[in-house]
Every structure is written in structure tokens, then in C-alpha cells.
Amino acid sequence: MYVTDMTHYLDEWGSPVIRGPARRWAAFLGAIVSAASQQDAEAPIPTALRCRRRPGRKPCPGRLWALRREDGFIEWQCGACGDNGIIHHWENTLWDFSAFRPSTASETIDVEVSEAEYGALRSMFILSREEEAIVHRALLFVEETVRLTGTREEWESFVECVAAEANHARERQTRVVLARVVDRIEAALALAGHSSPTPPSGRGLPPNAGRPGQRATSLRVLRGGKADGRRHPRLRFPPTP
Ligand SMILES: [Zn+2]
């Protein structure tokens, strides 16, 4: 198990390290923080992030589960190989997207994209921090499908940005993939627009009902975790096959 203090991956200006051997590891953990910091505490979530391990030189097919604990620690674990760790001191770093966590009162619209489309969104350079938050908030919905969630307002600026990137992308493939994402967002917005104009109040399912993270009821306690004097890491994710 890796126990990581994210402040070790900041340079003297407080920005994430972008050079040297620590860069990849910092980016890997940073992505977990950006995802988990936007989710409800104590609810394990299936992120759309891939495992970094290459057992036998082949990429591990697993995706990562993450859990933001009430005490602030973020636990992560690969759903296939069980690689896991705990992250602390991530608050107020650039990886911290907790300010963008949608409030329970806000009505959100879901957009499902393929993993390839999600990969194209992750490689976009021109996103504002608000728009980036949507990308990091994504959850693996079912195998190879990623569910993005945002408010109508967030989607409206996001879709413009994706459309602009689609128009300017150098590679044809990227243009095609991003244009498909634009279509998906527009379709979801149009569909949501046909629902009752008065927002539902206290009726029916909560906005996050049915998302995969909430299906995770079978929790497991892993052995291990070095005795480092901190409060002790207990990972709570569905069993690794
Ligand atoms: Zn793995």
C-alpha cells in the first residue's frame, strides 16, 4: 500500500511537479484526488481512471475505485490487481476540485460517453477549471462507458468548449471523436429540456440515485498498511476478483 502526502509533489510555487520521475506518479495520484474530491464522503466510486501497473509488461485492465473518507483521507484501489493506496494533504492543491462538487439541491444532467471519447476529453487543453471539473467528476458507468455529470449551466459552457476544440483539432480522428461528444451533450440537454419546467422538489429519487458508486455495498477490509503512526487505512471497495 502506498501512503502519499500530495504536498511532496508540489514545486516551490505550489504547482504540481511536471518534470522528473515524480511527474507520472504525481499525475496518477492527482487524477484520483480530482475525482474523489468531488464525490460524497464515504461512498466508494468507480472512477474512469486506469490502473498504472503493467504486470508481465501488459497494461492491467483494471479501473480504479476511490473513496474520500470523512477524515479527509482518499483511498484508492485497482479493481483488477488490487494495487492500492491512501492519499492525504491534497486539500487546497490544484488537484482539489471539492469546490466544484455539485450541491445536492442542484439538478444535474448525465451524459454517457465511450472510454475513447472520455480519453479525448481528458487530453483537451483549453478547458477552464469549471469545465475541467466535469471531466474529473466522471464515473465508470458500465464497462467501457463513462458517465459525466453536470448542471445545465456547466454543460452549456462545456459543450461550447468541446465544439471549439473539435473545430481546431489537428487530427481528423480527434475532431470526429469530439464532435460525437458534442452531439451526445446536445442530445442530453435537449432531452432534459423536455421535462417539466418546474424543478422537482423532494420527490422521487435523489439526483445521484442509481450511480454505480452507490451499488458498492460489499465492502472489504484489506490487510496490510504500514504502521506509520497515522490513523489506519482500511480500504473499502468491492473485492478484487
Ligand atoms: Zn491494476
Image (cartoon, grey):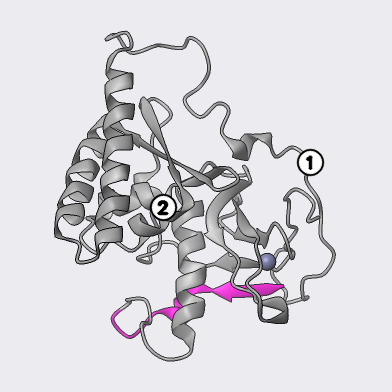
Span shown in magenta:
1-13
The residue type indicated by label 2 comes to Tyr
Is residue 145 depicted above or below 241 in this figure?
Answer: above
Q: Picture coordinates of residue 101 (x, y %)?
A: 40, 43
> Could you tell me the amino acid type at mark 1?
Ser
Which residue is located at x 27 percent, y 22 percent? Answer: 190
Quadrant of the rendering where the N terminus is positioned: bottom right
Q: Secondary structure at mark 1?
A: loop
Q: Quadrant of residue 215?
A: top right
The quarter of the rendering in which ligand 1 is drawn is bottom right
At x 34%, y 50%, the residue is: 133
- Circle on res. 54: none
Q: Which mark is residue 118?
A: 2
Disc 2 on helix, strand or loop? Answer: helix
> Does 88 sit left or right of 223 as displayed?
left
Q: Return the residue nearer the eye: 40 or 199.
A: 199
State left or right for residue 70 relative to residue 1: left
Kindly identify the residue that appears in the image at 60 percent across and 46 percent down.
Answer: 143
For the residues marked 1 and 2, what is the alpha-carbon distance in whole angstroms?
A: 28 Å
